[in-house]
Amino acid sequence: MTNAAASILEQLAAKFPSETSELKAERGQQWGYVAKGAVKKVLTYLKNDCDFNILMDLTCVDYLHWEEKAERFEVVYNIYSMSRNERIILRAKVAEDDAVVESAASIWPGANWFEREVWDMFGVRFTGHPNLKRLIMYEEFQGHALRKDYPYSKRQPLIGPKN
Amino acid sequence: MGKPLPSDYKVTESRSMLLNIGPSHPAMHGVIRIVAELDGETVTSIDTEIGYLHRAFEKSCEQGHYNVALPYSDRLNYVSPLISNIGYCMSVEKLLDIETTDRCKYIRVIMSEISRVTDHLTCVGASSMELGAFTVFLYMIKAREWFWEIVEMVTGARLTISYARVGGLKADLPDGFKEKTLTAIAETRKVLKEVEGLLNTNRIFYDRMKDTGVISKEDALAYGVTGPFLRSTGVDLDARRYAPYLVYDRLDFDIPVGEHGDNLDRYYVRMEEMQQSMRIIEQALRDMPAGDVAVDLAGHPAREVAIEADKMVDEAKIGHTRGFQQSVVTADPTLEGSSGAAHKNVYSTNKLVALPKKEDTYGNIEGLMNHFKLVMHGHGIRPPKGEAYVPLEGANGELGFFVVSDGSDKPYRVRVRPPCFTIMSALHKILVGDQVADIIPSFGSVNMIAGELDR
């Protein structure tokens, strides 16, 4: 709270005017969008230069039915800084036909499992991830369960691993 | 000392051993599989496999109304369900931008802290049992039982509580709550003292906990570990302090921190957190605004007629609704919700989210329509389009619900940030380098809750 410097939103807007957009404080949190290609660059800057040391959450939302969303997926980074007591929720728009994002696992090792879960549930891949395999479902599972076009009532036989 | 090996003796091969622990192993607190690679007794690498308790929580939440998702949130953490319940409601309230009443906030704090105590009691008790301290387990479960009786008294259930509502709470506190809680706290303090006497200077316990399962401050932060686990490394990060929600900023409490990040420190941190939680409950009980049940009756003599809720429902079904508006319903708080007069103390008056009082539902058309609009398919709570995230301090670390609304009556996406997820992802940092036997106390101190880990 004692941070006299500018808020992270102003800092990001000054440093990455073209890579970040829609930076705003709303509903008690700070939100922003980051261009997909600049994810690693911006996150590294946040970690190393702004002391955003904890990746609290990393998830994804499938905006299949939203008309105003041009891209289908949004990967959500929820990052907290202890020294500044600030949190920013950054989102990256990801198109369905190119659902690949740079991995944050080299910045925060905690991203490893979060990204595996996103791959498992949404089918968004992360380049540079050390071990991108399904986390919750089994390897033989077909499809990605949290996608909006995966039917809720769909059942699949549980296929055991091939020995 | 045997004979020296002959000079032509050849060591042909040296292999590590794979040890498969779980998914159904008594010490695996739920279902999880750890494949440990061993060199003698030392763990050289581990592979953690989760997902055995996956019940499609997030997908299920998208299928029904906002209130339909509410009972699912009880089932996330089965030792402190009230915190996830309240957390979900707070995120939806944030989307709707509504405030709850002061009394409701205090009750939420009290119930959260009761949950935190039961969670820590379970964790410390169960992991002591795994080290052979069965007495401690019985003592702590006994203490937990006192708190669960209180939870049952308030919510009507021990585990599947569904107590919070978007905009408030299902019901006000029942009579005798304060006395019973204060008694439980006094008794639990005695139990904790007894447990400390049993464990703190116990050679077996101390040796198995000290310097095992160590995680450094840097590793814990890099993996996003929060809660007592992070605090045992000396970082005083607590959402109740850094982002005070409800009324935590009005209450006085300390955040215990450890030093070494080992199992023993985590035990100390949890023991002290229980004391602090009980301190918070005492303060909240003292400061809580009174439920002004009698105020509503003042000046409305006709309202002194009280009807039992089930009788009112029966009468209303056959159209006998005369005089309902002037009467007060006496409801069993554990089953039917608050009685009418207590309703407004704990429930928002916002008609967009809060179900009306029963006497209004059955007594006048406005109340009936309000009820209809909230419960019928295609109506219900409709937050504006957008996203909200509210961080809470769960018993195990930061718990947060990321709720996305598309403006309809169903949540578009509900994402939980489960506190033990990050700890589990850092499990190899905790276990590798220790002995096989250390897996048990270390894993016990993780306090993994498979319900929220796998969702």
Image: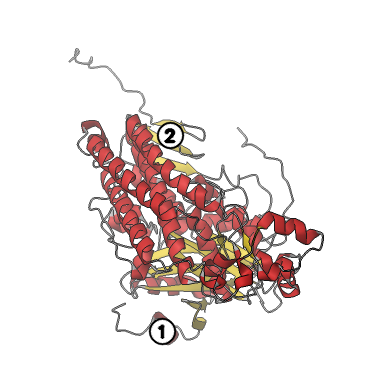
Q: Quadrant of residue A56?
A: bottom left
Q: Is residue A75 left or right of residue A63?
A: left
Badge 1: few (under 14), some or many (20 or more) residues near its Cα, within 10 Å?
few
Tell which of B137 and B19 is nearer to you.
B137
Residue B440 bears which disc, if any? none
The answer as to whether the residues below labels 2 and 1 share one chain is no
Residue to which mark 1 is pinned: A15
Residue to which mark 2 is pinned: B27
User: Is B23 rendered above or below residue B275?
Assistant: above
Look at the image and tell me in which quarter the N terminus of chain B lies: top left
Q: Secondary structure at mark 1?
A: helix
User: Is B239 rendered above or below residue B180?
Assistant: below
Residue depicted at 75% across the width and 56% down the height: B314
Residue depicted at 34% across the width and 38% down the height: B441
Mark 2 belongs to chain: B
Question: Which amino acid does the dot numbered 1 rest on?
Answer: Lys
Badge 2: few (under 14), some or many (20 or more) residues near its Cα, within 10 Å?
some
- The answer to whether residue B407 of the structure is visible from this angle is yes
Q: Quadrant of residue A96?
A: bottom right
What is the x, y in percent for residue B188?
Answer: 33, 44
Question: Which amino acid does the dot numbered 2 rest on?
Answer: Ala
What is the x, y in percent for residue A23?
Answer: 49, 82
User: Is A157 rendered above or below residue B303?
Assistant: above
Residue depicted at 43% across the width and 41% down the height: B145
User: Is A3 rendered above or below residue B334?
Assistant: below
What is the x, y in percent for residue A65?
Answer: 72, 70
